[in-house]
Amino acid sequence: MTELLAKALENARQLPQELQDQLAQELLEEIEWECSWERTLADSQEKLERLADKAEQEYRAGRAKESGFDDL
C-alpha cells in the first residue's frame, strides 16, 4: 500500500461511521470500474491490432485520405 493511501485511510478512521461507509463504497466502486476498464482494454487489444493493420494496408494502397476532427 502506498503511503498516500495509508494516510487517506488513517484520516478516514477519524470520520463518522456513516461517512466511512460512504467513502468505502465509493472506493470499491472506483476499484471495480478500473478493473473493468483494464479488462476491456486487454480484451480489445487483438481487435485494435487488426484495425491498425487494416488502416495501414488502406494507407499503403492509397485508399486513405487525410482528415481532421472537423471532417468527422
Image (cartoon, grey):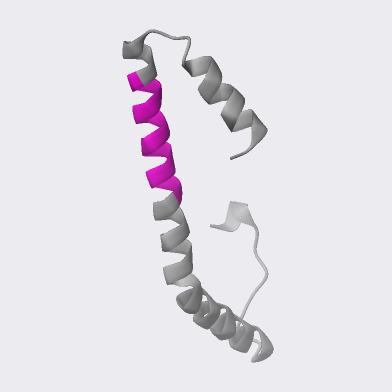
Q: Is residue 38 left or right of residue 4?
A: left
Who is closer to the viewer here, 14 or 36?
A: 14
Magenta highlight on residue 26: yes
Q: Is residue 4 left or right of residue 21?
A: right
Residue 26 percent location from the top left of the image: 38, 29
Q: Give the total of numbered labels.
A: 0
Q: Is residue 4 above or below residue 69?
A: above
The image quadrant of residue 58 is: bottom right
Residue 50 percent location from the top left of the image: 51, 82
- Secondary structure mostly seen in the magenta stretch: helix
Residue at left offset 58%, top offset 78%: 52
Residues in magenta?
A: 21-34
The image quadrant of residue 6 is: top right
Residue at left offset 65%, top offset 64%: 67
Q: Is residue 60 left or right of residue 19?
A: right
Magenta highlight on residue 62: no
Who is closer to the viewer here, 62 or 30?
A: 30
Residue 3 percent location from the top left of the image: 66, 32
Residue at left offset 46%, top offset 16%: 13
Judged from this view, the residue extending furthest toward the bottom is: 61
Q: Is residue 57 above or below residue 33?
A: below
Q: Is residue 9 above or below residue 41?
A: above
Image quadrant containing the N terminus: top right
Residue at left offset 53%, top offset 57%: 72
